[in-house]
Amino acid sequence: MSIPSAKYLKKKASNRLEGNKEAKTLVLIYAGILAGSSLVVNAVKYLLDGQISQTGGLQGISTRSLLSTTSTALTIAQMLLVMCLTLGYTAAMLRIARGQYASRSTLKAGVERVWVLLRTRLLQAAIFIAITLALGFLTVNLYFLTPFANRLLVATLPLTEGGTMSAEAMLSLLDTAYTAMLPLLIIYLVLLIPMTWLYSCTYRMVDYLLIDRPQLGAFGVLRESRRMMHGNMKMMLRVDISLWWYYVLQWLVSCLIYLDILLAIFGVSLPLSPVAYFFAIVLAYLAADFAVRYFFSNRIAVTYALFYDSLCPKQPQDGAVLGNIFQM
């Protein structure tokens, strides 16, 4: 099967989106709901955390438990909203990639598939956890083949001899042990980064299959995604590399979450109260995230949808697959 080049996919995505006002409306709704819900959840959780910190003593245990449960429930609810809305947005972009009309009701596609979506995400999480554990085991074994392992054993030997240690001796031991373990972290990252990309690439088609092949269950979409990506990862890598600027933008936006830490590192202090400081950071992050999604997400999403479509058997263009499911 011949897959178009990254340049062709991006050009075709631009053509599909050119003059498409509905696509702009859809991404506005998508990005707006994500930003709005995140702002509300962060505000409520901030208030709840404040109440929890002010509730002390044994008499406040039940109140703290209730507030903590509410905070956790809000986080879970937001995660579900993001998953469902993102799947609906993916369905809309797939329709646009195929030259079909995508109505606003298409954004509800994730809600229609919420249970199989949840099962799929749980299976994906289980697979990724298994990968990280296996890599951890491999990393430890590789580490103990290096000279750094001997340094760690020598550094921690006093801990096995019993007796007491002064605070200075303990700090010195911990510093030496940390230095000796640094290669362990490096080995783990060297193994984890490419494996994470391979994992992500293997299951990159999952969301499209959840929408496009409703007859498949959670195991089915994972298996089919593996089949579709077999032999096509190199082309996917080329597409990813061609869109490097988008991933850099996402990374820069994510850095805004740690704006308070970054400002402290550079010795910058803003004349704001703690509450104003917190919401200033949240609003800065959400505004930047909204801008990136609104101006660039459609182009990226349609490009990847075209990649998926190039791996699929050709379908009739008279409303097949998604054509009759999500109408106005």
Image (spheres, rainbow, N blue to C red):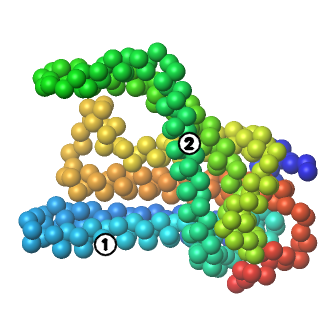
Residue at the disc numbered 1: 70
Residue 210 position (above or below residue 228): below
Q: Is residue 225 above or below residue 189?
A: below
Q: From the viewer's perspective, is the residue at label 2 or at label 1 nearer?
A: 2
Name the amino acid, label 1.
Thr
Which quadrant of the figure has residue 84? bottom right
Residue 73 lies in quadrant: bottom left
From the image, tell me which residue sits under label 2: 134
Q: Which x, y percent locates residue 325?
A: 74, 81
From the top left corner, tell me how far across and down residue 252 is, in percent. Answer: 49, 42
Q: Position of residue 85 (x, y in %)?
A: 57, 69
Residue that appears at 74% across and 54% down:
226
| Badge 1 density bin: few <14, some 14–19, many ≥20, Cα 10 Å | some
Taking depth in this image into account, of 84 and 164 the one nearest to the observer is 164
How many marks the image carries: the answer is 2
Nearest the viewer among 230 and 295 is: 230
- The kind of residue on which mark 2 rests is Ala
Farthest-out residue, front:
161
Tell me if I can see residue 50 in this picture: yes
Residue at 30% of width from left, 65% of height from top?
A: 45
Residue 311 spot, x, y in % from top left: 84, 56
Give neighbour class at mark 2: few <14, some 14-19, many 20+ (Cα, 10 Å). Answer: few
Q: Earlier in the sequence, mark 2 or mark 1?
A: 1
Residue 8: numbered disc: none
Image side of residue 62 versus residue 266, left or right: left
* Quadrant housing residue 316: bottom right
Q: Is residue 90 above or below residue 149?
A: below
